[in-house]
Amino acid sequence: MADELRVPASTLAEIRAGLGRGRSALEEAGSSAPRSVDAGDMTAMLTGMLSKALEGAATMSEGIAGVSSQVGEAGATFWETDAGVASAYAGRGLPDGD
């Protein structure tokens, strides 16, 4: 089939692992951000910018977690459906063409 897409379970596991590593790196970067900024007259502006950047990173981290979960659910659903189809056709054999 030309339009067929095959994704081995190991590939799905690699995708989830990569997403997990990316999320961990993002969270580590966020936890190492300075808690205060001393920039004289620019302190308020820079603190606000830092706050927005950290909020964006937190939102991105949540999004990555959601995507990772969906990849896992999609893989599990595929294999459950595949097992159901295999079970339904077990023992039937191929049609003889008559």
Image (spheres, helix red, strand yellow):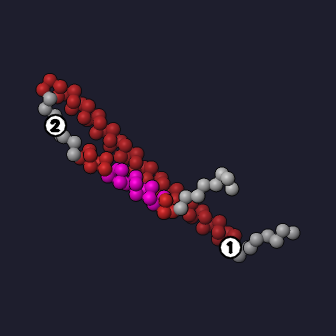
- Secondary structure beneath label 1: loop
Assign the C terminus to one quadrant of the image: bottom right
Tell me which residue sits at (68%, 73%) in the image: 90
Q: Position of residue 37 (x, y in %)?
A: 16, 34
In the image, farthest residue toward the front: 2
Specify the label residue 33 is tagged with. none
Tell me which residue sits at (35%, 46%) in the image: 61
Q: Position of residue 65 (x, y in %)?
A: 39, 50
Magenta segment includes 36: no
Displayed quadrant of residue 91: bottom right
Specify the label residue 90 is tagged with. 1
Assign the N terminus to one quadrant of the image: bottom right
In the image, farthest residue toward the bottom: 91
Q: Which residues are magenta?
A: 12-24
Displayed quadrant of residue 48: top left
Q: Which residue is mark 2?
A: 36
Foreground residue among 24 and 78: 24
Q: Position of residue 7 (x, y in %)?
A: 55, 58
**Which amino acid does the dot numbered 2 rest on?**
Ser
Is 55 on the left-hand or right-hand side of 44? right
Q: Position of residue 96 (x, y in %)?
A: 82, 71
Q: Is residue 43 above or below residue 25?
A: above
- Secondary structure beneath label 2: loop
In the image, farthest residue toward the top: 41
Q: Earlier in the sequence, mark 2 or mark 1?
A: 2
Magenta segment includes 22: yes
Is 25 on the left-hand or right-hand side of 64? left
Counting every numbered tag in the picture gives: 2
Q: Majority secondary structure of the magenta segment?
A: helix
